[in-house]
Image (cartoon, rainbow, N blue to C red):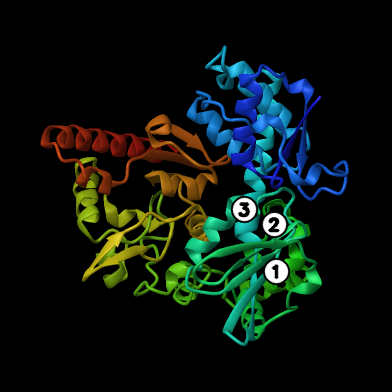
Amino acid sequence: MQRVLLAHPADLDGFRAAVRGLMARNIPPAEVLWDIAGDPALPLGDEGSRSEGAVAAPPLRVPRAFAELAQRVICHRAPERFALLHQALVRLQGDRHLLDNRTDPLVDRLQAMAKAVGRDIHKMRAFLRFREIADAEGPHFIAWFEPDHHILRHSIGFFIRRFASQRWTILTPDLSAHWDGKAIDFLPGATRGDGPAEDALEPLWASYFTHIFNPARLKLKAMQSEMPKKYWKNLPEAALISDLVAAAPARLQAMVEAGRAPTLARLAESARDCSLCPLHGPATQTVFGEGPADARLMLVGEQPGDMEDLEGRPFVGPAGKLLDRALAEAGIDRTRCYVTNAVKHFKFEARGKRRIHQSPSPAEIEACRWWLDQELDLVAPALVLLLGASAARAVLGRPVTVGRERGRPIPLGARRTAFLTVHPSYLLRIESQEVAEAEYGRFVADLQAARALAEAA
């Protein structure tokens, strides 16, 4: 039996080096034991060196899809993950299209593991909360999280990008990470008691959460599906949820009797001070949707651009003017449509005096999805026209490839349909005039199809 020692539970580089050596010597997966440094179950004396499995060997040729799959599967907590990846690598040498066969038990298992890790990563990004303390070096932000899998190393780049200028520490039971503003250090695991219980901002956040909680659209099962109770103890707003849910019927009745039922105007007013994601900081203002509350057609774009950010209205820049022209050619009156964006603040990179558009991240789309869901509920359009992949992700709740799903109806429950096309800014980026004209014609055809669906609904 061959033993391989990896540096840590998600040691993808170590796994790659070892498995190349194993396969170069034709050692089958069934004859390999994978060990993790620091594991108390390791035989005495195995801690100091790696096995012969990590001998120098040429790289293996594998599809890009396997490389991406392995990055997530290696983070799974199942101890057999290394053997399963080893098995897949052996089979890929004779069948390059193995991963296309989802009925294969090995492929199905690996895909399920990758999906579970992906969900865990999403939950960490969505439900991790930093609390501020002060130490000798100044402000220090500390968060506690209990992931299901070994995802901290995989996820750390996300937090570095979002909070590059701050000092912070993420504590988990297996591993901790500290960012000093320049470099990341991985430290031993911790306990919940090692982090602060609360900070000075939590009463303000709790007040904000209570203010935006809308009893008119309470869907408890959907909320618990997206935010399972295991994460509530990490969220300052979670302590309020039980009381808010219990009081929801009475609050809703009082709103109706007082004429304070939610309206688009009140929603836009509430969104003006939104700080659910970091984009509100550099943006000039919230850019909310506009249009009649009974519109049968709702247009959803990606986010405001430079001109929209300055004027406070959606689709008034170059992409908006192109959209207006295409709508007119398709026989759609924009003034009878409700027009909005998936994200309500302008995300950009400053280059001198210019502000260069940047696409919103999945986390930013998810943070702003609450407002978009409110707009959908209040307008209740028959058809939702999705302009680009970000809009589709926000409404459908999943990653979307525009080329694959463009131009066909997508059911959104019993009484609503979505229809996907490109964002008009895509047309502005096409350099070839001939291609641009052809794509514009296709865009107008999509709008005509959307109009027909809305009229027939």
- The quarter of the picture where the N terminus appears is top right
- Residue at image point 79% right, 69% down: 192
Q: Specify the amino acid type for callout 1.
A: Leu
Which numbered disc covers residue 227?
A: 2
Depth check: give the residue in front, 98 or 317: 98
Q: Is 368 on the left or on the right of 235, as rendered?
A: left
**Residue corresponding to mark 3:** 153
Q: Secondary structure at mark 1?
A: loop
Q: Specify the amino acid type for callout 3.
A: Arg
> Residue 86 in the image: x percent, y percent?
67, 26
- The quarter of the picture where the C terminus appears is top left
State whether residue 377 is above or below residue 420: below
- Mark with earlier residue (2, 1): 2
- Residue at image point 72% right, 54% down: 147
Displayed quadrant of residue 199: bottom right
Q: Secondary structure at mark 3?
A: helix
Depth check: give the residue in front, 122 or 313: 122
Tell me the CA gap for discs 3 and 2: 23 Å
State whether residue 435 is above or below residue 386: above
- Mark with earlier residue (3, 2): 3
- In front: label 2 or label 1: 1
**Residue corresponding to mark 1:** 235
Q: Specify the amino acid type for callout 2.
A: Met
> Residue 267 in the image: x percent, y percent?
49, 70
Which numbered disc covers residue 137?
A: none
Q: Is 268 on the left or on the right of 435, as rendered?
A: right
Does the CB distance between marks 3 and 2 fall below 8 Å? no
> Residue 259 in the image: x percent, y percent?
57, 75
- In front: label 3 or label 1: 3
Displayed quadrant of residue 419: top left
Does the CB distance between marks 2 and 1 fall below 8 Å? yes
Tell me the CA gap for discs 3 and 1: 22 Å
